Image: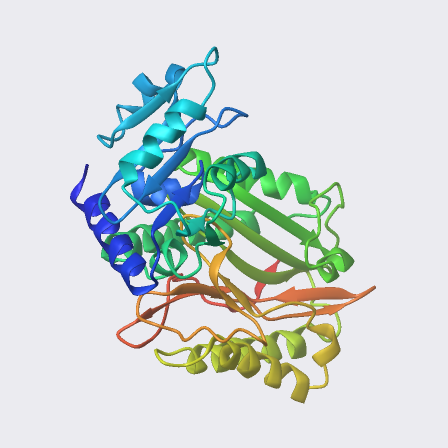
Amino acid sequence: MTTILASRLDSLRARMAATATDLVVIGPSSHMVYLADLSPHGDERPVLLMVSPTFAGFLMPALNVDSARQHTDLPFFPWTDADGPSAALEELLAATGIDRTAPSIVLDETMRTDFALLVLDALPGAIRRFTDDTVGYLRSRKDAAEYRALKKSAVLNDAAMAAGFAALRPGITEREVATVIRDFYKANGATTEFCSVCFGQNGAFPHHHTGETQLKDGDAVLIDTGARIYGYPSDMTRVGYYGSAPEGFGQIHSILDRAVEAAIKAAHAGARASSVDKAARDVITSAGYGPNFLHRTGHGLGIDIHEGPYITATADTVLEEGMVFSIEPGIYLQGQFGLRLEEIVIIRNGVAEILSDMPRTAVAGG
């Protein structure tokens, strides 16, 4: 086990002590990647990582053990298709050393329901909750290595975004621009996480599906894209136009830029996530476009594109050093265009630091 993984298990056990947790149960998920650097084959065969104050080990199908052994030195409790997982699960639970009368357990909220029920059936007196104050708590506070990976991923995304805007020409389709960006990622050793290219009126749909719409003079262009490299993703939105800017574009862009700046200023250690949302929303509401801001201000970013903390009007999360999240206010004008500006920031030295190096200036094509 690497020093980083050993440290994460130590930190998890400290959180378990602080939250009176007897057992953490993780399925094949990004939580398992975070704790054990293991992403086992996912099917209906139960795979579980169990962590107690004194023990950590895997329930694992026997046919996957040899491959998984290359990635972890934690013990396995294998089971075969012929025998089923029940006996191996009992052995694993016994090895954890927990009192099974009424244990406080944490279940991976992303695991298959049948995996979770297998655990709950074996621990009928368990008091259960999800990972928010244990694994989720730890994952939301990035360490120095995670910061470096996220920064490198963001800078690569800057170049991919620039390549996408550079490809604009009359008649090119949204899908063709997305292909330019995806090819850039591949050529630079990254894999595409997502890529949304929106021309004209399509930008007014916050989750537009990139299609065959062709670019024409006077179209606003919105590109929201991200890739994964070094194990961590990027996520950024920039906007521009082709030829002449559509009426109102400059005004909306200016409002959004001010909203981003206000949110960044509000995002500091000790502030609540809701105050960041409010800072962005107040700028847009004061400008008369409150009803056109259709979504939360941001989401956390880490191993997953969307993870805690979430930047919403009701989020009471207190921002702490190492937290990484998006700030992405948008204004969507149906039948005209929609604009969104997105930065990924990290709370570093107490304040919000932007990971991207690309300006938010509107990109003019043509």
In the displayed orientation, state which residue is furthest to the left.
3
Q: Is residue 357 above or below residue 284?
A: above
Image position of 153 (left or right of 240) = left
Location of residue 332 in the rendering, given as x and y in whole percent from the top left corner: 72, 68
Q: Is residue 82 above or below residue 92?
A: above
Image position of 251 (left or right of 216) = left
Image position of 314 (left or right of 357) = right
**Viewer-nearest residue: 173 or 236:** 236
Q: Is residue 366 visible?
A: no
Residue drawn at (30%, 53%) of the image:
146
**Viewer-nearest residue: 67 or 286:** 67
* Image quadrant occupied by the N terminus: top left
The coloring applied to the image is rainbow
Location of residue 179 in the rendering, given as x and y in whole percent from the top left corner: 58, 37
In the displayed orientation, state which residue is furthest to the top.
82
Q: Quadrant of residue 39?
A: top left
Location of residue 42 in the rendering, given as x and y in whole percent from the top left corner: 49, 28
* Image quadrant occupied by the C terminus: bottom right
Q: Is residue 9 above or below residue 257?
A: above
Residue drawn at (20%, 50%) of the image:
7
In the displayed orientation, state which residue is furthest to the bottom.
286
Q: Is residue 161 visible?
A: yes
Residue drawn at (33%, 32%) of the image:
92
In the displayed orientation, state which residue is furthest to the front.
101
Location of residue 53 in the rendering, given as x and y in whole percent from the top left corner: 25, 49
**Viewer-nearest residue: 115 or 155:** 115
